[in-house]
Amino acid sequence: MKGKRILVTAGPTCESIDPVRYITNHSSGKMGYALAKMACLRGADVTLVSGPVDLIPPIGAEFVPITTAREMFEAVTKISDKQDIIIKAAAVADYRPKHISDDKVKKADNELSIELERTDDILAYLGAHRKPGQFLCGFSMETRDMLGNSRAKLKKKNLDMIAANNLKVEGAGFQGDTNVLTLITQDEEVSLPLMSKEEAAAKILDKILSLIQKEKA
Ligand code: CTP
């Protein structure tokens, strides 16, 4: 992958409610960090844009830490034009609190509702604005109708490939060191067996490179 610029996003985003609390998800960042590491080992120029996680970025990768979906949008779109490959493994919040309270929200005896507004869909933006020849890979996490829902995202967000996983399958998902992925493109679906996230990252990179090669031929 020498000479190839690759941007990987990883981890969750955190959306503040007040100075004390935030909304987030269970993403560990392990899949994205494995992708960044494997791409570095293959000689690519790697940028890793990551939400807050408990992992050390791979040596050799340019590291851009962010917290919110808005910050990830800004960090990614600032450099997306220069990238040959973008892999969006991050679990970006789809909603954020509409108002962030300056002071700690105090409890009362009644119930509390928090009004949420949509965040930018970064991947959809990249799909709509990508430069010719750029390869775009998304991730899709589902709990049912994984193939149908993931195919719909592939089309809607104008992607070349989507790596889908079902949170309810043993060994797949957020926190563990393994994953069970299906790599979906317009023409095919490749089901990978249970493997480590690093092995899965290698398979994803192999598939991307072979698709780029095919496109060139
Ligand atoms: N994604 C993104 N920006 C968002 C939400 C998601 O870039 N605001 C990206 C993720 O990084 C991932 C892909 O979109 O690569 C799919 O994310 P997922 O949460 O599975 O799907 P959504 O499009 O958010 O749809 P839903 O949550 O309804 O399943």
Image (cartoon, rainbow, N blue to C red):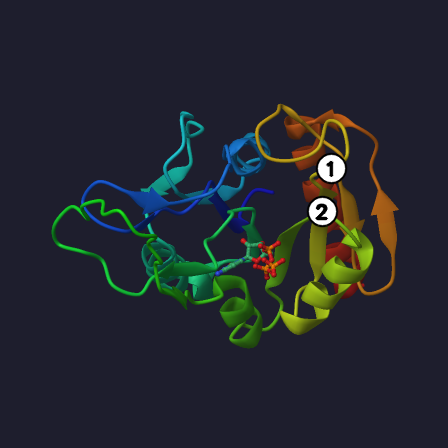
Query: Is 100 left or right of 120, judged from the image as shown?
Result: left
Question: Which percent across, then down, holds residue 194?
Answer: 79, 28
Q: Which circle's residue, 1 or 2, is located before the other in the chain? A: 2
**CB-based contact (under 8 Å), mark 1 and mark 2:** yes
Which residue occupies the extreme front position in the image?
A: 109
Residue 73 in sight in this render? yes
Name the residue: 50% across, 32% down.
28
Q: Which residue is mark 2?
A: 143
Which mark is drawn over residue 168? 1
Question: Which percent across, then down, holds residue 141?
Answer: 66, 48
Q: Using the image as rendered, state which of residue 138 and residue 202 is in the foreground.
A: 138
Of helix, strand and loop, which one carries label 1? loop
Q: Work out how far the residue at label 1 is from the one at label 2, CA to CA, in angstroms.
A: 6 Å
Q: Amino acid at mark 1?
A: Lys
Question: Which percent across, then down, holds residue 46?
Answer: 47, 43
Name the residue: 73% across, 67% down.
152
Does residue 134 lie above or below 89 as drawn?
A: below
Query: Is 37 left or right of 146, judged from the image as shown?
Result: left
Q: Amino acid at mark 2?
A: Thr
Query: Is 200 left or right of 119, judged from the image as shown?
Result: right
Label 2: how many Cα within 10 Å (few below 14, some 14–19, many 20+): few
